[in-house]
Structures are given as C-alpha cells and as structure tokens.
Image: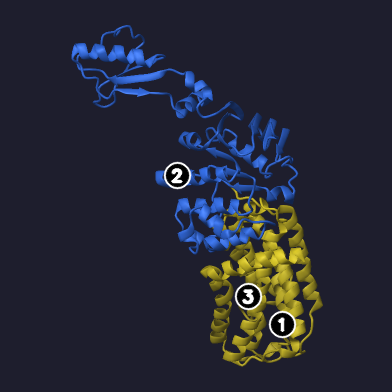
Amino acid sequence: MSEPVISIEGLHKSYGKVEAVRGVDLRVESGEIFAVVGPNGAGKTTTLEILEGYVDRDAGRVEVLGTDPADPTPAWRERIGIVLQETALETLLSVRESLELYAGYYSAPRPVDEVIDLVGLTDEADRRAGRLSGGQKRRLDVGIALVGDPDLLFLDEPTTGFDPSARRQAWQMVADLRDLGKTILLTTHYMEEAQFLADRVAVINRGVVVANDTPEQLGDRESLPTRVSFRVPPGGLPLEIAGIEDITIESGSQGETSRATFESGSPTADLARLTSWALEAGIELESLEVRRPTLEDVYLDLTNR
Amino acid sequence: MKPIRLALHEFRFSQKVFWRNPGSVFFTVLLPVLFLVIFGTIFGNDPIDTLGGIPTTTYYIPAIVTLAVVSATMVSLAVNLTTAREAGLLKRGRGTPQPPWVFIAGRVGNAVVVSALMVVVVTLVGNLLYGAPVPWRHVPEIALTLFIGAASFCCLGVAMTAIIPSREAAPAITNVITLPLYFLSGVFIPENEIPDGVLTFAGFFPVRNFFEAFFAAYGSGAAGSSVEWGSLLAVAVWGLAGLALAIRFFRWSPRH
C-alpha cells in the first residue's frame, strides 16, 4: 500500500482544562474522500486545524503529505487547499478577481476560468462575492482553496446552513473533485452527506474516534436488524402475531394512533407472516414501513453511548 | 524581486477594495476635504496674529493634511485589518504558501499611497478655494515628513487591531483615540485658541508632533520651511513602540 496522505497517531490537544482531542488515530489514503463526523465540540475542527498547520498539538504523531504540519513549509502549503468553517471572502472583489488574487500566491495555479467552471460559478464570474447567495459564496470558498491546484483539500462543514438543492449542487461539485484525483478530508453534521460523498467515515465523539469504516459498514450496519412498523389497527393487536415476538407499541402523539414496531433479522419471512395474518383477519396495515438502519441511526447510537 | 512582486500583487487588490468601499472613500478621502471647507467657512481667512499673521486657511492646510494622513494610515489600517481578521481573510492568507507579512504589506502600501494622494488633494483644494500657496519648493521636507509619519502611524494602526475585538467596534475605538487628539493638538481649532498647558499635554502624543512637523515643512509659519526633527523623532518613537506592540500582540484569527 502506498504512503497515506494523512496519518495521525495518538493525537492530543487541550485548551486549558478542556481536552478537545484525546488520542485520535486516523489514516487517509491517496485519492479518497474521507468524512469526519461527530457532534459539536467533539474535536473535529481542532483535529482539522492541527492537520492544516493552524494549531499546535500537545502530543501524538501527525504527518500530512509526508510533512509535520506543526512545521509548515511554503512547498507543503502549495499542496494543500483549505476551506475554513466560516466562509472567508473579500466581499468587494468579484468571483474572478478573488480567484486571481489567490492564484497569485501559488507557483503553479490552476487557470482561473477552469476553477470558475469547476465550482459552477460561470454565470457569476463578474459578480462581487458579497452579492452571491450563501451556496455560491461557499462554492467560491472552495474555488479559492482549489486555485493553487492542491493534492489535498480540507473542507470544514462545507454545506452547513444550505438549503437542500444548494447542498445537492455542492455534493456534485465535491464528487467531481474526486475525479481530478484530489484527496479530500471533510467534516460534516449531515450523515446523508457522508453517505453520498465519503469513501470512508470516522465518527469522533468526545475527542476520540469511536468508529471508522465505509459508510455501508460503519458500526456494523449491514448486520443490524431491519425495523418494521405500522399503525396499530382499531381493534388492537394480539400479543404475538404468527410467531413474531417483541412487538413494541409506542403511543402516538396528539390524536395519532399508536405504532407497532419490531426488529427483524429475517424480514422477508417475518413480513410474509405479518401480512398473511393481516389478510386473514381482514386488517389493512396502515402506513406500513420497512426500514434498514440509516447511517444516521448508527451515528446517533455511536455518539449517545 | 519576488517580495516586491508579491507586495504589488497584494497592493493592486487592496486598491480595488479601497475604492469600492463607500465608507473608506468617504471617511478617508472626502471627509478631510469637507473639514477644510467647513473650517475655512467658519473661521474665515483672517490672519492669526500670534502665529506671525498667517491666514487661517494657510494654517489649516497642514492641519487637515495631518488628519488625512492619520486617517488614511492608522485609522484605515486598524479598521481594514480588523475587518479582514474577523472575516477570516488573514487566517485564510496564512494557509497559503505566502509569508504572512505580505497580507499586511499590501494594505500598508495602499495606506501610504492614499496618504500621498491626500497631501496633494488637500494642498490643491486649499490653493483653489482659499489661495493658500502651493509649497512647490518644500516638496522634499513635506515628503520626508509624510514618509516618517505615514510609516509610524501605519505601525500604530496595526498595533491598534490588538485592542479592537470586532469589526463593529473598530470605528468607535479609532474615533475615541483620534478625535480628542485632533481637538487638543490644534488640528480642528487654531492653536492660538488652545491653552498652553493643553498643547504641552498634546505634545506627548504623536498627532500633535506630526502636525508640528507638517506645519514646519509647509513653511506655514513666519520662519519658512524646515524639517522639525524633534517632532519627527517623537512621531518615529511612537511608531517604533507601535511596531513592537504589533509584533507582540497581532492576531491572525477571528474571535469566535
């Protein structure tokens, strides 16, 4: 296996008495999109800022593109692009001017017009940054991080506060960057985002990595049971339906009828038994749902422990 | 050559941002001219007997030039750098391969160029409206005073950002520092109206010294043009103190 783009071992960082990062280990391989998820204050941004060379660590071994970020060199900075958590733009410069400004800082920048197309701001190229929508501003932010043609891109919560369509556009843009061979490390609050974009996901909670896997495998998701639920029929339910056990009844809120839920390791068979029971009894199972645990379910489970 | 090319690149964009910002154009460029016209109108053009009989507007040219340079350097830099810091622009700049000083140098260059422009504008407006003589023969003295003063007040402006917590607080804090000094130093009110004790007190601060240096350089007094070395030295000492504080306390990242 080739050298990892990022490797972290036993990373620690405290601010005063607050231990923000308490022994994080991670490896990010070349060309992958790696998502770091976790609640606010879990240590995501601190970890990222240590990798970006903004914050000095207290302990641990860190290498980013073969360099210790505590000792950043201009040659190393040529190879990384950074999108900070807060959008940072000069509002009075146009999209093109903003990119020209930052292109001047790099020895081999990517052509400005190419970057404008890449982040989907072709029609807004001459509009001032201050007059862009929130989603467009964030895409310009990403464009500025890309203009130096970096090998590694850091995206700290790139879509926080976006409406769903702006988020979709941003995802498509990030997915396109993968095709350019960039390695991307992003943090996010949105499990859908990690699911859509990431090759691998690490969950950080209270300063440590509690899970690290592909979105499909995370938290052993594939082996978790399927949840089946439906509205309790007007006549009520027997305690046991055709051999299905452990049916829990949740009382509905404000006038809604209660819901019955069970977890199943063999949903095909259990559903067949449930539906044949309902057909025989002449009952319609209203709002019947069969649901695999989502990444969000796994995440909530991992971070609430 | 590379550092110069970089600073010029940064300067070019600082200029764009400066002239597109209505606030900076009004307060830095238009307001000093407005002050000159207002004071010329209120105080008339009578000779000031205690200052060798010079016309009031002739007195006001170096006074308003002082205000304009302080405004273009110290005030404008403090506001501009605080805004850039709080917007995350300085932090972002540090994430590029450039040495951090580039991001200050471009803005300092902008401040110095605008200062020089303002010296010309105020002098010409004084000549056109009030017939105050254009001191062509004193250009070397004026340039020297401008250079030392602009450099010193730039250092003070960078240092001031350390005590300005937010973009919103920047105009208030800079005004609280500069406005009383303008009044006490004879920039707004002719110094023959100001008690000696007050002028002595003001003499501890850089604005009064800078004004004295410009007054001498313009040859506005009876003695003709000269370089007021003592005042310039006082300005430079303040500037160096500002530089030391700036190096020690300057912050690149916004407060969250």
- The chain whose colour is yellow is B
Residue ID at (77%, 66%) = B1
Within 10 Å of the Cα at label 3, are there few (<14), some (14-19), or many (20+) other Cα atoms?
A: many
Residue ID at (55%, 38%) = A187
| Camera-nearest residue between A42 and A188 | A188
Can you give x and y, in whole percent of width and height, for residue B40 in the image?
57, 86
Identify residue for label 3: B68
- Given the image, on which type of amino acid does mark 2 rest? Arg
Identify residue for label 2: A167
Q: For marks 1 and 3, give the CA distance.
A: 14 Å
Can you give x and y, in whole percent of width and height, for residue B7 in the image?
70, 65
Q: For marks 3 and 2, give the CA distance.
A: 47 Å
Colour scheme in use: by chain
Residue B215, label in figure: 1
Compared with residue B104, is residue A182 higher up or lower down, i.e. above or below?
A: above
Compared with residue B172, is residue B183 higher up or lower down, i.e. above or below?
A: below
Considering the numbered disc 3 on the image, is that residue within a helix, a strand or a loop? helix
| Camera-nearest residue between B188 and B147 | B147
